[in-house]
Image (cartoon, rainbow, N blue to C red):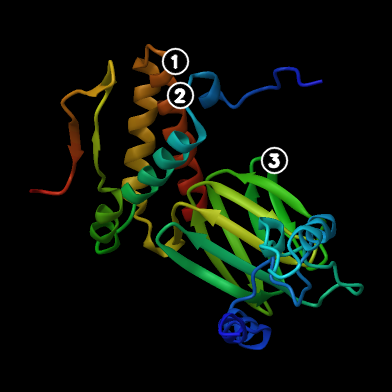
Amino acid sequence: MSSSAAQPFWRAAGMTYITYSNLCASLVRQCLKEPYRSEAVSREKVHFNVSKWVDGKPEKPTIRTDTPE
Amino acid sequence: MLRHGSRSLFNRASATSMRRRRQFSTDLPAETVEDTKFVESWKKMNPNMDPPKTPSAYMKPRPPTPANIPSKLTVNLVLPYDSVLSSKEVDMVIVPATTGQMGVLPGHVATISELKPGILSVHEGNDVTKYFLSSGFAFVHANSVADIIAIEATPVDRLDPNLVQKGLADFQQKLNTASTDVEKAEAQIGIDVHSALNAALTG
C-alpha cells in the first residue's frame, strides 16, 4: 500500500524534519530587528556532550557548547 | 482506612477546577475508562485489595464533538519557549499550510497540516493579528480547538527588511555555487524562508 510518496526536497537530500525546522527558525531569527535579535541569540545556544561507546567502554566525550565555561 | 485519605485530596472537584484554567483539546468532564475484565479477574484473585489502575484508566477519552457548531474557535499558538496564544477565542485563523493558505473557522473538520514558513493571521472581530511562523504544524480538532505549534513566531513588525533582502540575495548566490545535495537543499530552504519573509513584509 505504501509506495514511496513524493518527498519534500530536503528529505530527498537526507535532511530530517527537525533539522529543516531548526534551520528555518534560525534563519528567521537572523532577520529580526534589534533588540529582539539579541534576545533570540540565547535561544540558539546548545550545550551537550557526546561520547561514543566502543567495546562497552565510553571513549573521550566531545563537548559541544556555546556557553563560555 | 488511611489509604482513602489521599484519595479525597485528589477528588474530582479540586482536580478539575485546577486544570480548568486552560482549555486543552483533550480536556474532559469525563469518566475514566476502566478495564472491566481485568478488574473482575483481580477481584476474584484478591478481593481485599483495590485493583491497580492501568494506564488506560488515566487516559482521558477524546473530547466529544459538540452537537452545535461553536461560535468561536479556540486557538493555542505555542513555541518551545513561550505560549503566544493560550485558549484564545477567535473567529478565524488563516494558517500557512504547505498545501496553501488554509482558513480555519469554528466547526472545521479535524485536520493535521504541516506548515511552511509564512504568516498566521488571527481574526477576532475587526482585529487581525499577524505572526510570521518559521514552520511547524497545525492541529485542528473536531471540537473547534486549533493547536498551532512552531519554533519561531514573530509579529511582522519585528522583522528587518534589509536583512531579509540581503539574506535572499546571499542564498540565491549559494544556490548557484552549491555542489552537494545538502548544500543545494540548505540554499533552497534559505531562499524559501527569505522569500516568505519578503512577501510577509511587502504583502
Asked whether residue B165 is in view, the answer is yes
Circle nearer the N terminus (1, 3): 3
- The amino acid type found where label 2 is placed reads Ala
For image coordinates 70% across by 48% down, the residue present is B112
Residue in the image at 71% along x and 52% along y: B102
Relative depth, front residue between B166 and A21 = A21
Q: Quadrant of residue A23?
A: top left
Whether residue B203 is visible, yes or no, is no
Q: Secondary structure at mark 2?
A: helix
Q: Amino acid at mark 1?
A: Asp
When the figure is inspected, residue B55 is found, relative to residue A49, above or below; the finding is below
- In-image side of B200 versus A27 (left or right): right
Q: Residues within 10 Å of mark 2 (few under 14, many from 20)?
A: many
Label 3 Cα crowd, 10 Å radius (few <14 / some 14-19 / many 20+): few
Left or right for B50, reference A20: right
Please, what secondary structure does the residue beneath circle 3 have? loop
> Residue under circle 3?
B99
Q: Residue at x 68, y 46 (%)?
A: B113
Residue B161 in the image: state x and y as whole percent: 37, 52
Instruction: Locate the N terminus of chain B and report the quarter of the image it occupies.
Output: bottom right
Question: Residue B33: image x %, image y %?
Answer: 78, 64
Label 1 resides on the chain identified as: B
B30, B80: nearer the viewer: B30
* Badge number at residue B185: 2
B189 in relation to B27, above or below: above
> Circle 3 marks a residue in which chain?
B
| Vertical arrangement, residue A35 with respect to residue B194, above or below | below
SS at circle 1:
helix
Locate the C terminus of chain B by quadrant: bottom right
- Compared across the picture, whether B192 is left or right of B8 comes to left
Q: Which label number is shown at residue B181?
A: 1
Residue placed furthest toward the top = B179
